[in-house]
Image (cartoon, rainbow, N blue to C red):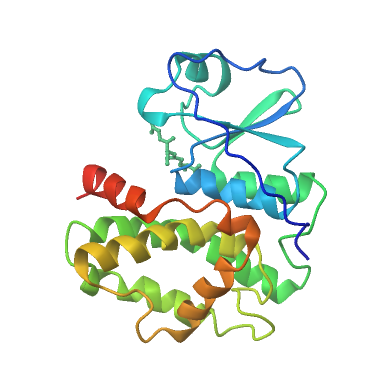
Amino acid sequence: MASPIVVEDRPAPLDATADPPAVFDGTTRLYTSYVCPFAQRVWITRNFKGLQEKIKLVPLDLGNRPDWYKEKVYPENKVPALEHNGKIIGESLDLIKYLDNTFEGASLYPEDHAKREFGDELLKYADTFYKTMYASLKGDPSKETPPVLDYLENALYKFDDGPFFLGQLSLVDIAYIPFMERFQIVLNEFFKFDVTAERPKLSAWIKELNKVDAYAQTKIDPKEIMEIFKKKFM
Ligand SMILES: N[C@@H](CCC(=O)N[C@@H](CS)C(=O)NCC(=O)O)C(=O)O
């Protein structure tokens, strides 16, 4: 079960003029960006586990990033990064596992061996998925994306005890949904290509995820998605 619904105000992103937080003062902080799909994975995980009080959001303006972020916090200069117990941890897939294993709250990975094995395979495939989707924008998505979309559609038939990849909501769904959110909009708007057409499982999966408050609260305005993609990828 998800934790009770918490409605949060989004703090304003910090830009180059902002002072740094009191780094390594014992506060657990998620350095993030509201528009970053990798960071969104960690944000959803935090929300679902009910860690809003324990893990403070520190959103950055990536286009005008403060120098102190690279210098004092995360030399990689990327989001997401988590400050916890005197250290900084990066990489979204590592972070969602870290949050699930380290903090209290609902578990996001099943105990069942077959589900874990399939979950590991799907988590590995997440890079192939998003890279194929981004690369397709330079060509014809209606030809280049069906293999990866069909892989996901077929994967959704594997367990029938719920609409999610491993039946119940897990880290696997959280790894994919930020990217699906963006590509559903962008492919529809710019290429008139519907990722869910003739993919009933995928369509139901997206609908069910939209009912999950921990995710719904992290969505960004579709107009903003289209502007970002127009500027950066097309
Ligand atoms: N592999 C990383 C990718 C993180 C990433 O690329 N984040 C982007 C924003 S969406 C970023 O911080 N870019 C800043 C930059 O590259 O300078 C992860 O999974 O966390």
**Tag count:** 0
Q: Is residue 179 visible?
A: yes
Whole-percent x, y for residue 126 in the image: 47, 60
Who is closer to the viewer here, 77 or 33? 33
Q: Which quadrant of the frame does ligand 1 lie within?
A: top left
Q: Does residue 46 lie above or below 214 as drawn?
A: above
Quadrant of the rendered structure where residue 81 is?
top right
What residue is rendered at 55% in x and 85% in y?
Answer: 157
Whole-percent x, y for residue 186 in the image: 30, 60
Who is closer to the viewer here, 201 or 18? 18
Quadrant of the rendered structure where residue 165 is?
bottom right
Whole-percent x, y for residue 87 in the image: 68, 25
Q: Residue furthest left?
A: 139
Whole-percent x, y for residue 51 in the image: 75, 44
User: Which quadrant would the N terminus be assigned to in this image?
Assistant: bottom right
Q: Does residue 100 lie above or below 199 as drawn?
A: above
Q: Does residue 29 lie above or below 140 as drawn?
A: above
Quadrant of the rendered structure where residue 114 is?
bottom right
What residue is rendered at 50% in x and 83% in y?
Answer: 201
Q: Does residue 158 lie above or below 193 as drawn?
A: below
Q: Is residue 97 visible?
A: no
16 with respect to 117 (left or right)? left
What residue is rendered at 50% in x and 71% in y?
Answer: 206
What residue is rendered at 50% in x and 61% in y?
Answer: 176
